[in-house]
Image (cartoon, rainbow, N blue to C red):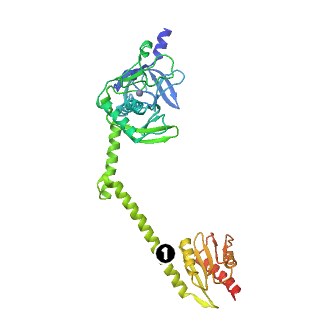
């Protein structure tokens, strides 16, 4: 009786022997909770629990969504996690086939690609990740040539095209000795082996297709160096098709936008980049000419008295670098004193003079800035600049007049 009860608590893990059954009947043999949600243990199940890098199946038990399937650490029981607890102990399980088949194709594709990298560059797979967003393997090499990636990809797709049988089973101990496993698991006791018709034999507990042709295209998307190893991102089957469809549409759109053939897109982009660079250079030169003209007209209009010209001007919404440039142009004229201000959230004041004069512009700048209660500013006797506090046009004009008074006091 005791033996019978222990036996009844153990779930028959049917996903090990059959990856294709999606509907089955079972009995609930225990009820529990998992992360605050109801969970049940069945006498038999086809639901694959998250393990070995492969995510769990989803589906239904009596129309109730199965949101997670996990292995309980204490006794390795398979917990079917639900949002709502089933009323009856007799349940019909329904597995989401699209998700399961996608996992089968990627898991089997991963075995083939991993073996292909062993054969092409003797690189071992040390990591595997499978999720709805990405599928990757990590290879124990520091770098990899593009041609080697192409070779491995070609070999992998050749194995697919040969439509080789895939067998998964639990070998007896004496049988194991004759198998040349790519990866030996770190477990005691019997373990499951997946054999892709002699091309790749490895230990694995996941769900796989029964013939390699079901995988469809195996496509490497990108390769990233990750310190000591290389991460290879790839897609199989429908995911590879969707990726191709999306990228093909994008490429066609780019080619249409650039009015070239898709193979001419890189050249077209190079031309655009060069054109953009030339235009920026021209624009800078034109801008310089405009600033020079603006400075000239300011100089012409400025007051001339006591043997020098005094240019006083307030600006609004002007770039500080531009105002500096205008000041530089102005003081390239002889006998010129310039006091410029820019209103804004970080208002600026510039006090400068031509080299043929001797008056120190720093005290004039500081007097102007004092109006704004700012003491961030200074420079050379011939060119001083400061500011950084907010000031409107009125406040800029007041500061300019204060600076001018200081200059006039010094120069007369
Ligand atoms: Zn596997």
Viewer-closest of 148 and 341:
148
The percent coordinates of residue 127 (x first, y second) are 48, 33
In the rendered structure, the answer to whether residue 30 lies left or right of residue 380 reads left
Q: Quadrant of ligand 1?
A: top left
Say which of 223 and 294 sits in front: 223
Would you call the spot at circle 1 few (<14 residues within 10 Å), some (14-19), or many (20 or more)? some
From this viewpoint, is residue 5 visible? yes
Image location (x, y in percent) of residue 406: 69, 83
Identify the element where label 1 is drawn.
Answer: helix
Looking at the image, which residue is at 53% across and 24% down? Answer: 73
What residue is disc 1 on? 288
Image height of 134 relative to 51, above or below: below
In the depicted structure, whether residue 366 falls above or below residue 34: below
Vertical comparison of 106 with 252: above or below: above
Q: Residue at x 33, y 38 (%)?
A: 238
Residue 99 screen position, x and y as percent:
37, 34
In front: 284, or 392?
284
């Amino acid at each position: 009786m005791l033996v019978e009860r222990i036996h009844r608590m153990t779930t028959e893990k049917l996903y090990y022997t059959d990856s294709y059954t999606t509907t089955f009947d079972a009995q609930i043999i225990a009820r529990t909770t998992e992360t605050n949600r109801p969970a049940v243990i069945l006498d038999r199940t086809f639901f694959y629990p998250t393990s070995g890098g492969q995510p769990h199946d989803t589906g239904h038990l009596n129309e109730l969504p199965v949101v997670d399937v996990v292995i309980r650490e204490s006794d390795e029981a398979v917990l079917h996690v639900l949002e709502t607890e089933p009323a009856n102990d007799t349940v019909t399980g329904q597995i989401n086939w699209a998700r399961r088949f996608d996992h089968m194709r990627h898991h089997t594709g991963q075995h083939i690609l991993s073996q292909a990298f062993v054969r092409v560059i003797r690189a071992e797979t040390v990591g595997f990740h499978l999720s709805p967003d990405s599928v990757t393997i990590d290879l124990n090499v520091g770098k990899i040539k593009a041609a080697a990636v192409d070779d491995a990809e070609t070999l992998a797709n050749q194995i697919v095209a040969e439509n080789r049988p895939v067998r998964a089973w639990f070998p007896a101990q004496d049988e194991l000795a004759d198998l040349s496993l790519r990866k030996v698991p770190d477990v005691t006791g019997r373990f499951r082996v997946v054999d892709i018709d002699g091309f790749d034999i490895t230990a694995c507990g996941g769900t796989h297709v029964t013939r390699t042709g079901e995988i469809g295209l195996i496509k490497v998307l990108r390769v990233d160096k990750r310190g000591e190893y290389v991460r290879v991102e790839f897609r199989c089957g429908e995911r590879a098709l969707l990726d191709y469809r999306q990228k093909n549409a994008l490429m066609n759109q780019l080619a249409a936008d650039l009015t070239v053939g898709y193979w001419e897109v890189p050249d077209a982009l190079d031309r655009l980049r060069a054109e953009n660079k030339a235009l920026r250079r021209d624009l800078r030169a034109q801008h310089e000419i405009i600033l020079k003209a603006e400075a000239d007209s300011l100089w012409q209009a400025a007051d001339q008295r006591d043997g020098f010209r005094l240019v006083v001007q307030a600006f609004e919404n002007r770039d500080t670098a531009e105002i500096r440039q205008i000041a530089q142009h102005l003081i390239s004229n002889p006998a010129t004193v310039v006091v410029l201000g820019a209103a804004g959230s970080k208002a600026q004041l510039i006090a400068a003079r031509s080299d043929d004069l001797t008056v120190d512009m720093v005290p004039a700048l500081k007097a102007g800035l004092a109006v704004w209660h700012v003491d961030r500013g200074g420079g050379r006797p011939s060119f001083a600049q400061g500011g950084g506090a907010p000031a409107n046009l009125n406040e800029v004009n007041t500061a300019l007049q204060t600076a001018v008074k200081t200059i006039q006091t010094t120069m007369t």
